[in-house]
Image: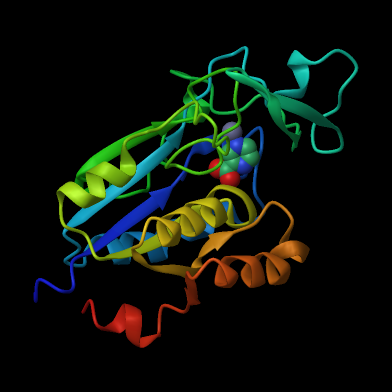
Amino acid sequence: MASNFRPALIVVDVQEDFCPPNGSLAVPEGRDVVAPINKLLALPFVLKVATKDWHPLDHVSFAANHAGKQPYVDFVTIVNPENATESYSSRLWPVHCVQGTGGAELLAELDVGRLDRIVEKGTDRRVEMYSPFYDPFVSPRVSDSGLATLLRDHAVTDVYVVGLAGDYCVKSCAEDAAKEGFRTYLIEECTRSVDAGNWPQCKVAIEGSGAKVVSVESPEVLRLM
Ligand code: VGL
Ligand code: ZN
């Protein structure tokens, strides 16, 4: 492949806790992403990375760690542990993807033998980290997975993003990949959202970041074959 086209695939959080029937934070139809993702994993990407949401049990995003708070409906203010003037409101979740538990495993059906690397995210109990690149704080950043460096070390030019959940981690991944300067494509058939009704709005935001939302039939995907 020409050196001006060095595509990477990022498979975001295709983990048991995000899938029916038993996931604690099951995304509707979440399991359906595996078949089309396995087809992509057979294509000649220069780098195939899976990310895992990988939380400690005392993670700030779990409603159970905040007295009187309910998952999905309540929010909490997360303050930058290194700069009290920086904060944002973040949605609370059921306990999910706890390090070392079955719920944090990648789906057994996923063709993990094709993966070059697994990147863990959300490991710092003090910050939410939807993006597999880094947490949303900027001054200073608290947690960085090293993903941008990994992509640059492989001279990646184009990033294809798939996985769960479309409206949270997949969205953040595509936005940050575009921000990092990679041509970025989010393949729509290969994601599902926590709130499917919000997906049209999410797509507008994703496209606003410079990433493109594309179909498996798009020229951007077909050129990989
Ligand atoms: C995710 C909510 C909480 C995701 C992770 O992978 O989209 N969503 N943690
Ligand atoms: Zn999480």
Which residue is found at the position 16% from the left and 66% from the top?
44
Image side of residue 57 versus residue 145, left or right: right
> Residue drawn 61% across and 28% down?
96
What residue do we see at 53% from left, 35% from top?
Answer: 135
Q: Position of residue 36 (x, y in %)?
A: 40, 66
Residue 19 in view in this figure: no
Is residue 16 depicted above or below 122 in this figure?
Answer: below
Q: Is residue 73 left or right of residue 45?
A: right
Quadrant where the N terminus lies? bottom left
Q: Name the image quarter holding the C terminus.
A: bottom left
Residue 202, percent from left and from top = 67, 64
90 in relation to 142, above or below: below
Q: Tell me: 116 left or right of 25.
A: left
Query: Does residue 90 appear in the picture of this structure?
Result: yes
* Residue 67 percent coordinates (x, y): 86, 12
Above/below status of 34 relative to 217: above
Q: Residue placed farthest to the right in the image?
A: 68
Q: Nearer the viewer, residue 151 or 108?
A: 151
Q: Of 121 and 194, which appears nearest the observer?
A: 121
At x 58%, y 57%, the residue is 166
For residue 16, side relative to residue 49 (left or right): right
Q: Nearer the viewer, residue 120 or 99?
A: 120
Q: Position of residue 18 (x, y in %)?
A: 58, 41
* Residue 159 drawn above or below residue 128: below
